[in-house]
Image (cartoon, rainbow, N blue to C red):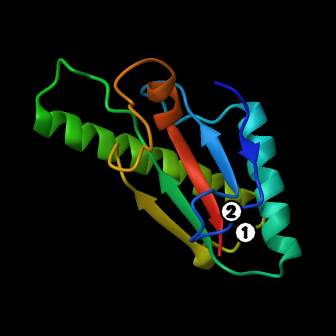
Amino acid sequence: VGSGRLGSGSFPNAAPYASIPFASGSAQLSGGDRRAIQQVAEAWQSRRGGSLRVVGHASSSAATRSATQKLIGNWQISQARATAVADALIQNGVDPGVIVIEAVGDSQSGADTSHGAGEAAGRRVDLFLE
């Protein structure tokens, strides 16, 4: 898992302000990801507020599970990832009242997340400064 990347996008633009990658089946943040989240919190503070949309994603792997199990599992892991990032934002001074959490499972991956690089790209949380 690499560190998060920062961009200049803001919601509702297609490009998020930042994307935080995750390991397969994990909702745990790495040290580099925590630094990226700290930078997002600082950017939010420098804007003097506004909303922060936190969107959790999952890859579409796990072919051995039924479609229902896969849907529930992907939604749960995307929710856990978004919550972990939101918690880290709050720890870095973001007002909890401005954070909007969304869990989208593998429904908005933007790539084929069933294998390879697309699968890794699907395991992320996107952050939008609104």
Q: Nearer the viewer, residue 66 or 95?
A: 66
Residue at 85% across, 63% down: 42
Q: Which residue is mark 1?
A: 94
Q: Amino acid at mark 2?
A: Ile
Viewport quadrant of the N terminus = top right
Q: Vertically, is 2 above or below 12?
A: above
The residue drawn where x is 70% and y is 81% is 50
Q: Amino acid at mark 1?
A: Val
- The quarter holding residue 14 reads bottom right
C-alpha separation, residue under disc 2 versus residue under disc 1: 5 Å
Q: Is residue 31 left or right of residue 10?
A: right
Instruction: Say if 96 sits above or below 41 in the image.
Output: below
117 on left or right of 52: left
Q: Position of residue 47 (x, y in %)?
A: 83, 77
Q: Nearer the viewer, residue 108 or 127?
A: 108
* Residue 35 - label: none
Left/right placement of residue 52 relative to residue 46 reads left
Q: Secondary structure at mark 1?
A: loop
Q: List the residue tagged with mark 2.
A: 90
Q: Residues within 10 Å of mark 1 (few under 14, many from 20)?
A: many
Which residue corresponds to the image point at 34% horizontal and 42% vertical from the top-left?
Answer: 106
